[in-house]
Image: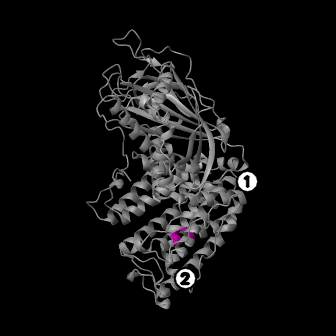
């Protein structure tokens, strides 16, 4: 994790609003980086609830890291002593700063400011934090625990049960009876952590397991080896852990729907770690047992569809467990049914894959590219995602020009030169006041304090937010301005799932477009993603390529579709799914030049927007947890574009004669 930003703008105090915004981003990033199961569950909550969960998690995580990793770089910027003092002094300073900020209701350090804003909004009692910091201090002096009651009541009371209590105001339960289940869930989560992290805790010289029960089973974690005694001991601990989850489960019904989905999904994912441990023959020494991202999606979907958490039972009996490899996560391969789009289309062996170099005729590709380059973009360039512009300005470089983008207080998107007309400051991370941008160097309000009659004109530019991407229109030689970008036909955004991937390469926009006008490379360059790719020459035209292709799910199973590639303008190519699963879905590829025209080493940014839709009931269910799905889409996009941007960069070198056959 990178160091925490104490102040992203040295020399000038941040406003309270900016501190809060920066601090909330830090809390979000801490949760995302360290508490993936918590993070996935929070995606069902509204924005305010998510902010509060991230704030409480960040407080607990930072305090825990001060104890376990006092010299970690990401703890810099907290406004407390660094690694030059001991963990105990640093924890004291951390707690003192938190409590002082809590009393004042603010702090100069953004992360503390965000934490105390949420804590005060939630009206959490001081007793919660008394118990929490008491538990953190025990980690400085205790390395083992004699019995389960001692571990539970002395340590986990403040490190786990109290966290369940602190989360209740966020979840807004219908009944005060939710308190007991919330405490049980906090204990269950932490006991799962203890069982999963035995190896890591041993590295720190600690054992969070009851010593009397270890002795009773004849188990010794310090040998770091799975023995029959260890299996029996860990099986008993897993039984205890599942009982805590069962005690927590009735509390889910006491929550409003969004909170119930959040807690139910988190409970299901965490409880499934126990099954992973069992399937690994109780080996918690050599590898940290996790639920895969695909497994998390499956468990979340099951929770949504059934309306209740999923508590998996034992995978094996400890008396019969053997040292066999982990079983497949899903247990079995998909079953073919005509009613689902997945088909059995085995990946052809490499020796049977037919070459496509004759079909990928250079004159054919160049002719299609020339026709695409004749289509006038009207000066419009893609500059990012709709969500890229928040409370402060951003700056993007387009064709050698720095362009600032910001949203006014009423949400209107605006764009201008990214260079301050006063002394040339870069206008990124600037605050917005009303409709004006505030230069970070001297507070110049733009545009209101810089009239056209001043010593230099400060240009503004037309902008467009299409709901997925942001566009800016710039005067461009050879292009005739038009009112709006030429957008392709898209699915309705309120019925679709969208994901955007951005990457840069040393090439021109035409090299990115040319890559997409060569579909014949797909099955060779991306065998992990595509197979059975055939260009339908009879259906294709000089302006449209029609292909049949199978999107690979596994080496045996895939989703066959028909797709068409068209170029609405010189910097865009679009793939439409016309037949098969996801009919109507689009994948838009936009190329934006960073360098000025004529640059010897041109650099372009590729922006790919996938906008997926389906009329299946399952897709409508999937949209309910689209934040869990889009990371997988972006991961696939990123993998494909590693290869495709290498293709585009190589094409530029060949085109310029830098490399020759």
Q: Quadrant of residue 541?
A: top right
Q: Nearer the viewer, residue 657 or 389?
A: 657
594, 180: nearer the viewer? 594
Q: Image point 52% across, 76% down: which residue? A: 152
**Is residue 480 positioned above or below 407 on the image?**
above
Residues 152 and 217: in front is 217
Residue located beneath label 2 in the image: 321
Q: What element carries label 1?
A: loop
- Is the magenta region chiefly helix, strand or loop? helix
Residue under pointer 1: 338
191 in the magenta segment: yes
Disc 1/disc 2 C-alpha distance (Å)? 38 Å
Residue 240 point in image, percent of width and height: 58, 78
Q: Give the range drawn in magenta.
A: 188-192
Is residue 407 shown in magenta?
no
Q: Is residue 105 visible?
A: no
Residue at 40 percent across and 39 percent down: it is 647
* Residue 468 relative to residue 593: left or right: right
Helix, strand or loop for disc 2: loop
Neighbour tally class for label 2: few under 14, some 14-19, many 20 plus, Cα within 10 Å? some
Give whichever of 73, 350 is nearer the camera.
350
Q: Indicate the quadrant containing the C terminus: top left, top right, bottom left or bottom right.
A: top left
| Disc on the earlier residue, 1 or 2 | 2
């Amino acid at each position: 994790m990178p160091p925490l930003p104490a102040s992203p703008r040295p020399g000038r105090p941040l406003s309270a609003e900016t501190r809060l915004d920066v601090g909330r981003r830090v809390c979000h990033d801490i949760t995302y980086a360290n508490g993936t199961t918590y993070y996935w569950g929070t995606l069902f909550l509204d924005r305010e609830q998510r902010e509060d969960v991230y704030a409480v998690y960040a407080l607990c995580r930072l305090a825990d890291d001060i104890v376990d990793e006092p010299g970690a770089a990401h703890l810099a910027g907290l406004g407390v002593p660094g690694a030059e003092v001991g963990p105990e002094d640093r924890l004291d300073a951390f707690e003192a700063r938190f409590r002082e900020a809590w009393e004042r209701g603010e702090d100069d350090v953004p992360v503390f400011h965000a934490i105390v804003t949420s804590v005060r909004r939630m009206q959490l009692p001081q007793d919660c934090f008394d118990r929490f910091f008491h538990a953190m201090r025990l980690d400085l002096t205790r390395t083992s625990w004699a019995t389960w009651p001692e571990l539970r009541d002395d340590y986990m009371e403040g490190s786990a049960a109290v966290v369940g209590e602190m989360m209740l105001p966020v979840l807004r339960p219908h009944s005060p009876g939710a308190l007991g289940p919330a405490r049980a869930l906090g204990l269950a989560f932490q006991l799962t952590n203890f069982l999963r992290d035995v190896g890591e805790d041993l590295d720190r010289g600690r054992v969070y397991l009851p010593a009397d029960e270890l002795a009773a089973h004849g188990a010794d974690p310090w040998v770091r080896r799975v023995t029959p005694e260890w299996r029996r001991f860990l099986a008993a601990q897993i039984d205890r852990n599942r009982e805590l989850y069962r005690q927590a489960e009735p509390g889910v019904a006491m929550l409003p729907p969004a909170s119930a989905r959040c807690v139910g999904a988190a409970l299901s994912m965490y409880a499934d770690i126990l099954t992973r441990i069992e399937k690994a023959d109780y080996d918690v020494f050599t590898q940290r047992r996790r639920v895969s991202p695909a497994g998390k999606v499956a468990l979340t979907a099951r929770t949504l569809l059934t309306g209740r958490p999923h508590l998996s039972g034992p995978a094996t009996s400890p008396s019969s467990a053997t040292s066999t490899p982990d079983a497949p996560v899903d247990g079995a391969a998909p079953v073919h049914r005509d009613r689902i789009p997945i088909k059995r289309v085995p990946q052809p062996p490499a020796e049977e894959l037919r070459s496509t170099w004759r079909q990928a005729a250079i004159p054919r590709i160049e002719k299609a590219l020339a026709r695409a380059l004749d289509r006038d973009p009207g000066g419009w360039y893609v500059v990012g995602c709709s969500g890229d512009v928040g409370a402060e300005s951003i700056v993007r470089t387009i064709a050698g020009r720095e362009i600032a983008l910001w949203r006014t207080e009423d949400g209107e998107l605006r764009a201008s030169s990214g260079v301050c007309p006063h002394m040339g400051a870069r206008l990124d991370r600037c605050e917005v006041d009303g409709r004006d941008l505030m230069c970070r160097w001297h507070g110049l309000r733009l545009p209101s304090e810089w009239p056209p009659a001043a010593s230099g004109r400060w240009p503004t530019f037309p902008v467009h937010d299409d709901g997925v991407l942001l566009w800016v229109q710039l005067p461009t030689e050879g292009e005739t301005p038009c009112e709006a970008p030429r957008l392709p036909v898209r699915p309705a955004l309120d019925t679709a799932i969208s994901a955007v991937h951005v990457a840069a390469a040393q090439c021109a926009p035409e090299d990115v477009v040319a890559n997409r006008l060569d579909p014949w490379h797909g099955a060779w360059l991306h065998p992990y993603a595509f197979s059975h790719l055939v260009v339908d020459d009879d259906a294709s035209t000089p302006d449209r390529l029609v292909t049949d292709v199978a999107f690979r799910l596994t080496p045996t199973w895939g989703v066959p579709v028909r797709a068409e590639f068209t170029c609405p303008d010189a910097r865009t190519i679009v793939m439409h799914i016309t037949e098969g699963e996801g009919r109507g879905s689009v994948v838009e590829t936009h190329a934006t030049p960073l360098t000025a025209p004529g640059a010897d080493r041109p650099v372009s940014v590729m922006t790919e927007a996938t906008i997926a839709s389906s009329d299946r009931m399952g897709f409508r269910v999937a949209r309910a947890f689209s934040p869990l799905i889009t990371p997988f889409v972006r991961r696939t996009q990123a993998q494909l574009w590693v290869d495709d941007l290498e293709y585009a960069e190589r094409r530029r070198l060949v085109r310029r004669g830098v490399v020759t056959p």
